[in-house]
Amino acid sequence: MTPSKPGRGSDQFPLRFPDGMRDRLKQEAEMNGRSMNAEIIARLEASLAPAKRGLLNSLKRSVSEFEEDQIASLRREMKELETLIRRFKGYESFEIAPKKKR
């Protein structure tokens, strides 16, 4: 788990920038009132957020499909039970008459 605010003790990764990128990042960081490190972290976090949303959406779809399958299965079972109940209701008219006392 990464800390919410990176510090000196955080994991480090040396990075080589293409020509001009360091200057552009420095400019952007200044405009956003951040250090260069904070700017890079913010941009990386923003780029990774869609992947998290994609995974979340995929999980939601899977759960929804599972729920739909379960509902369909329960509906089929209910229809079968209703059919059985209708059949057995016909047997109620064949009650056994009480025995006559002698």
Image (tube, helix red, strand yellow):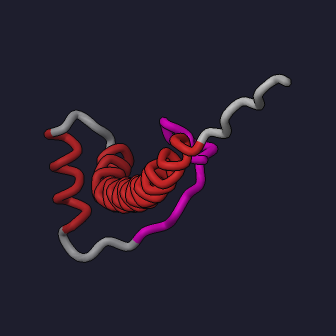
Q: Nearer the viewer, residue 34 or 82?
A: 82
- Left or right: 39 with respect to 9? left
- Left or right: 34 with respect to 20? right
* Residue 100 pos. (x, y %): 76, 27
Please report the residue visible at 16 percent of the width from the left and 49 percent of the height from the top.
27
Q: Quadrant of residue 51?
A: bottom left
* Residue 64 pos. (x, y %): 36, 55
Please report the residue visible at 49 percent of the width from the left and 45 percent of the height from the top.
89
Instruction: List the single residue furthest toward the top.
Output: 101
Instruction: Magenta stretch: give its range.
Output: 1-15
Q: Nearer the viewer, residue 55 or 31?
A: 55
Instruction: List the single residue furthest toward the right.
Output: 102
Instruction: List the single residue furthest toward the front.
Output: 102
Would you say residue 77 sits in the magenta stretch?
no
Q: Nearer the viewer, residue 92 or 41?
A: 92
- Left or right: 53 with respect to 15? left
Please report the residue visible at 17 percent of the width from the left and 48 percent of the height from the top.
28
Q: Nearer the viewer, residue 78 or 4?
A: 78
Is residue 63 visible to us here?
no
Please report the residue visible at 63 percent of the width from the left and 44 percent of the height from the top.
9
Q: Quadrant of residue 73?
A: bottom left
- Left or right: 18 with respect to 71? left
Would you say residue 6 sits in the magenta stretch?
yes
* Residue 44 pos. (x, y %): 34, 56
